[in-house]
Amino acid sequence: MTFAEQLAAEKGAKQIVALSTQAFNYFQQKGGYAEVTPDVLPPERRKKYDTNARKSKVMLKAAVQAVAADTSRA
């Protein structure tokens, strides 16, 4: 999860969306994701979501840009 979040932030994503049918508690408790409505999904993905019988929970988290550590010495 951490690697995917870092990669998304490096690519300029402002938010990360995860869909889950069983691991949503993990995403909430360990990852800091919040459950949201499917309205946050992009239109093409929302169509697929609506036609899929799985009815995954939609989770959202803000992507955080990593702050580079200052390695210079004074």
Image (spheres, rainbow, N blue to C red):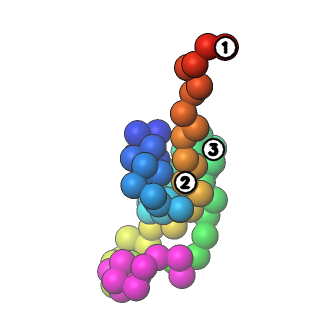
Residue count near mark 3 (Cα–Cα under 10 Å), binned few <14, some 14–19, many ≥20: few
Q: Nearer the viewer, mark 1 or mark 3?
A: 1
Asked which quadrant contains residue 36, the reply is bottom right
The label number, if any, that marks residue 7 in the structure image:
none
39 is higher (above) or lower (below) than 7: below
Number of disc labels: 3
Q: Residue at x 67, y 14 (%)?
A: 74
54 is higher (above) or lower (below) than 5: below
SS under mark 3: helix
Asked if labels 3 and 1 touch by Cβ distance under 8 angstroms, the answer is no
Q: Nearer the viewer, mark 3 or mark 2?
A: 2
Name the residue carrying label 1. Answer: 74
Direction from residue 48 to residue 72 in the image, left or right:
right
Amino acid at pointer 1: Ala
Q: Residue at x 47, y 51 (%)?
A: 9
- x and y percentages locating residue 49 in the rendered image: 38, 78
The label number, if any, that marks residue 63 in the structure image:
2
Asked if labels 2 and 3 touch by Cβ distance under 8 angstroms, the answer is no
Q: Residue at x 63, y 59 (%)?
A: 34
Earlier residue among tags 3 and 2: 3
Asked if labels 2 and 1 touch by Cβ distance under 8 angstroms, the answer is no
Q: Which residues are magenta?
A: 39-48
Residue 45 falls within the magenta-colored stretch: yes
Q: Residue at x 47, y 60 (%)?
A: 13
Q: Alpha carbon of mark 1 to alpha carbon of mark 3: how far?
A: 40 Å
The label number, if any, that marks residue 29 in the structure image:
3
SS under mark 1: loop
Amino acid at pointer 2: Ala
Is residue 25 at all visible to an observer of this figure? no
